Amino acid sequence: MRTKKSIGKKILSANEEYALKNKQLLAEHKKLCLNMISSPGSGKTTILSRTISELKDRIRIGVIEGDIQTDLDAEKIRATGAPAIQINTNGACHLSAAQISSALKQLPLDDLDLIFIENVGNLVCPSAFELGETGKVAVLSVPEGDDKPIKYPAIFARAKALLINKIDMLQTGGQADFDIERAKRDVRKLNKTIEIFPISAKTGEGMQSWYNWLLKSVKNLQS
Amino acid sequence: MRTKKSIGKKILSANEEYALKNKQLLAEHKKLCLNMISSPGSGKTTILSRTISELKDRIRIGVIEGDIQTDLDAEKIRATGAPAIQINTNGACHLSAAQISSALKQLPLDDLDLIFIENVGNLVCPSAFELGETGKVAVLSVPEGDDKPIKYPAIFARAKALLINKIDMLQTGGQADFDIERAKRDVRKLNKTIEIFPISAKTGEGMQSWYNWLLKSVKNLQS
């Protein structure tokens, strides 16, 4: 157990070293960098595509896409005109800070205001690995159920913002059992300062508040 | 790297040793044991609750519930009258064979025909850890999207059966973009022998084929 523990610590420290370098690079360039974390299929790519398209005249956004396999998500992002770097983890359940370090070098940083990292779809592991990001954004979608914050608390406790996506499904009758007030209450018990945005990336409902928060965050960092 | 690799191997072997013991125990008792793996919120607990209730006059089912925190799921299972053992992983992203070994001792094995293991909600990590189960059952829910088999292939390649859940949502218009034939095709490219059951654990649609497969599997093992 001792050996396992010390090896575990060493791996974490190597990741933290890269994370620190990434953080310094982003701070020097005054770039906002948000690490998006959620279950598979909560809608991260759809949220990013809509956000990029609707904010393209206000801020310039780049994306680092993390997937176990395929570059489907990077292709969707590039279709919006934004630069996207695809990282394939080939089985690993989260992005590492070393991978982000390499991807940041490939992005045209000086031309960007905001970098999104779309982590591997996994509500558990990515929250434990710092990437040097400015902050984490959690996404929880309505069909996943309102009990997820108490069952998977780590990411909800650590995120700067939570997007509750697919709120259009609250009205379909299919998910009338998702109690949005319960979800908010449970998240705020874990995290007093988190910003919560109920949205539908499909219909656009609620997206303006999310955009305002992004624009304000970019402005605060650059001023 | 050498140290890390050999340690990694040692950890896997310890898990495999427990998995082998579990497999032997289950074989001696002629018990079918299915390890359910999916993203958070795909409906595993709802599927199990309905399955237990509707099969209670045919076979006797017990459940081992894996969650990072809370015993909400075990409570739901116990409400059906079935025995359920809750394991809290306290942050770990998958169940281990040692945890299953301990849980099997707490279940009334002689009174059961079938043991379900509901793994931690995570489409990535649990598929890499053998628990000694007879087979793995993957669950993919419609709102997660039909691209998940190619993006997260490991579990789809390894499962004996796949439940495509929440097919009632195909009709709501909210998820008309889930192409069930595409999902089946992509899964069968990874896994030629997998059984695929499109179901709605909410409405009951498609559940009978899943029940028939379970009953047949129990019978084959006990004969």
Image: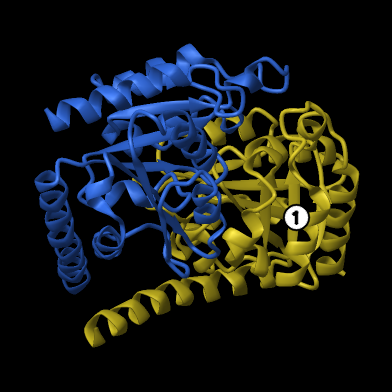
Chain colours: A blue, B yellow
Tag count: 1
For label 1, the crowd category at 10 Å Cα-Cα, with few meaning under 14, some 14 to 19 and many 20 or more, is some
- The amino acid marked with disc number 1 is Ala
Q: Is residue B81 left or right of residue A111?
A: right
Classify the position of the N terminus of chain B by image quarter.
bottom left
Residue at horizontal 88 percent and vertical 42 percent from the top: B206
**Depth order, front residue of B56/A162:** A162
Give the residue furthest to the top.
Answer: A181
- Decide if residue B35 is in sight here: no
Vertical comparison of A113 with B118: above or below: above
Single out the residue that lies furthest toward the bottom.
B2
Residue B184 at what x, y percent from top left?
79, 58
Residue B189 rendering spot, x and y as whole percentages: 75, 71
B154 up-or-down from A48: above or below = below
At horizontal 88% and vertical 60% (from top left) the residue drawn is: B216
* Callout 1: SS: helix
Q: Is residue B108 above or below residue A60?
A: below
Who's the residue at 23% across and 61% down the image? A101
Label 1 sits on residue = B183
- Residue for point 15% across, 31% down: A221
Q: Can you give x and y, in whole percent of width and height, for residue A98 in the image?
A: 24, 65
In front: A126, or B133?
A: A126
Q: Quadrant of residue A16?
A: bottom left
Q: Position of residue B164 (x, y in %)?
A: 75, 47
Q: Which quarter of the picture shows residue A30?
A: top left
Q: Quadrant of the C terminus of chain B?
A: bottom right
Report if residue B139 is visible in the image. yes
Tag 1 subunit: B
A40 left or right of A122?
right
